[in-house]
Image (spheres, rainbow, N blue to C red):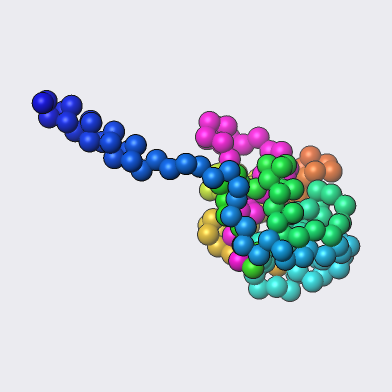
Amino acid sequence: MNRTFTFLLSITVVAMASCQAVNDSPRVLGGDVGLSAVDSAAYLDGISSLPTVSEAEAFKGILLVLTKPHKATFAQAVAALQERKIVGANWDFQADRAITKGRIAYMTYQACGLKGGLTLQLTGPSQRYCLKELQYRGLISPGVTYNAITGMEYVAVLGRIDEFRQTGKVAGASDREGGLE
């Protein structure tokens, strides 16, 4: 046999052997954690002092911006955000895990219905490129995708999401690093 053919055949066998069936249902740990219905002011006051924001608290905040406050479990919040394509289809979820800046950026990008630059349009949204786009627009503070987000940072992001959804821009974004108006 030809060496090139043998090499290509072995690569094909390895690639096919590593293929796995895709599980459509997300992995949700702590799905029965209740997300109580609170008003925006009480939520923002409570979350602003947290050193890190959990996924459950972050999802509650996004849902407060997008819909009316209502009582739900963490699993129901995940399902609602997946239905709206606010969270990634291939993410795993854990209610008590600190949410990362990359996930917040992705959720913000999707919630605001933004259209990014060439890379985002060609590859689709990813945590990395959503974070870069939002930092460029001045909607989120500098950092890397794996950094946990603090309560005060998250309150600021929620305010910017709400303002952008209502007006199509964020006042003072040009004053922040990288922002454009």
Instruction: Say if residue 159 shows up in the picture.
Output: no
Location of residue 1 (image quadrant): top left
Which stretch did the figure color magenta? 97-125
Judge left or right: residue 81 versus residue 133: right
Which residue is rendered at x = 86% and y = 56% of the image? 69
Where is residue 11, by image quadrant? top left
**Which corner quadrant holds the C terminus?**
top right
Report if residue 142 lies within the magenta region.
no
Q: Is residue 74 left or right of residue 147?
A: right
Going 72% across and 66% down the picture, which residue do you hit?
33
Nearer-the-camera pick, 9 or 179: 9
Q: Where is residue 23 in the image (x, y as percent from the top left)?
A: 54, 45
x, y percent for residue 174: 70, 47
Give me the residue at 70% from left, 56% from top: 75
Query: Would you say the magenta stretch is mainly helix, strand or loop?
Result: helix
On the image, the x and y values in percent for residue 83 come to: 71, 42
Would you say residue 123 sits in the magenta stretch? yes
Residue 135 to residue 71: above or below: above
